[in-house]
Amino acid sequence: MDFSSYVENIKSKFKKEQLKTFDFIVCFDKLNLASLGSNDIEGYQVFTPEHIVKQMVEAIGEDVLDFNKTILEPTSGDGAFTTYILRKRLDTIKNDFEAESLKALSTIYSIEMDKELIIKQRNNIFTLIKLYVKENKIEVDESYFDMVKCIITTNFLWAMFNTDNKEGPLFGISVAYKMPNAEKGDLKLLDFPVWNITKENVTYHEEGVEV
Ligand SMILES: C[S@@+](CC[C@H](N)C(=O)[O-])C[C@H]1O[C@@H](n2cnc3c(N)ncnc32)[C@H](O)[C@@H]1O
């Protein structure tokens, strides 16, 4: 399937920084996930190892594999959970890999406030899909990978997650604030996209984050 016209249309509506994010997405040689790191303000943080990710995802059950159900990883690091869940979803696809895999990706949402980590995570997601296609000898149009990059750009956000609104119109509502503004106290709310992917068309519209 040729996605070029959809990609062109979607990119024409992207803001400057989204175009930069799109252009920045690259494929690593292999997944680049840390189980230990040193990148937060306390100088030390733990990334969840795969066997724990596996147990936690299994505890959620089959819902995780339903592409119509949305998943939000609000403090996502370099993608321990998002890459694991996406791979599990890809494993369930029997036919029509291009459209189905885009659907699988499009309902995974991710927030991370550390810029380096969200960049790394976007690349991990892209790498996972590229290697999956290669290793399983799946035929895809070259334009498919640009469509993947469009979804990664809109769904994997450099943002600060906050469930702690104690007053005002956002009382009790979970939100995502744009980075780096949020760190300076300038709280700009972010929207998440809702993708509509069919064989005939690929579009998205934005909706407020409410989880
Ligand atoms: C301990 S790491 C875990 C990352 C990943 N969930 C994992 O299990 O490997 C926590 C991550 O959450 C990010 N983080 C902490 N508070 C956040 C917030 N309010 N909004 C977005 N990201 C946040 C940190 O930058 C860090 O990368």
Image (spheres, grey):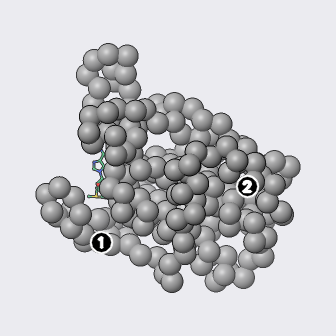
In the depicted structure, whether residue 66 falls above or below residue 121: above
Which residue is at a point 79% across and 59% down the rendered structure image?
Answer: 3
- Look at mark 2 in the image and give the residue it sits on: 7
Asked if the residue at label 1 sits under 8 Å from ligand 1, the reply is: yes
Badge 2 element: helix
| Residue 50: quarter of image | bottom left
In this view, the residue farthest toward the top is: 168
Closer to the N terminus: mark 2 or mark 1? 2
Locate residue 148 relative to residue 63 in the image: left or right: right
User: Residue type at mark 2?
Assistant: Val
Name the spot of residue 160 as percent of width and height, x first: 34, 43
Residue closer to the observer: 50 or 145: 145
Disc number at residue 35? 1
Classify 10 Å Cα crowding around label 2: few (below 14), some (14-19), many (20 and above): many
SS at badge 1? loop
Which image quadrant: the C terminus? top left
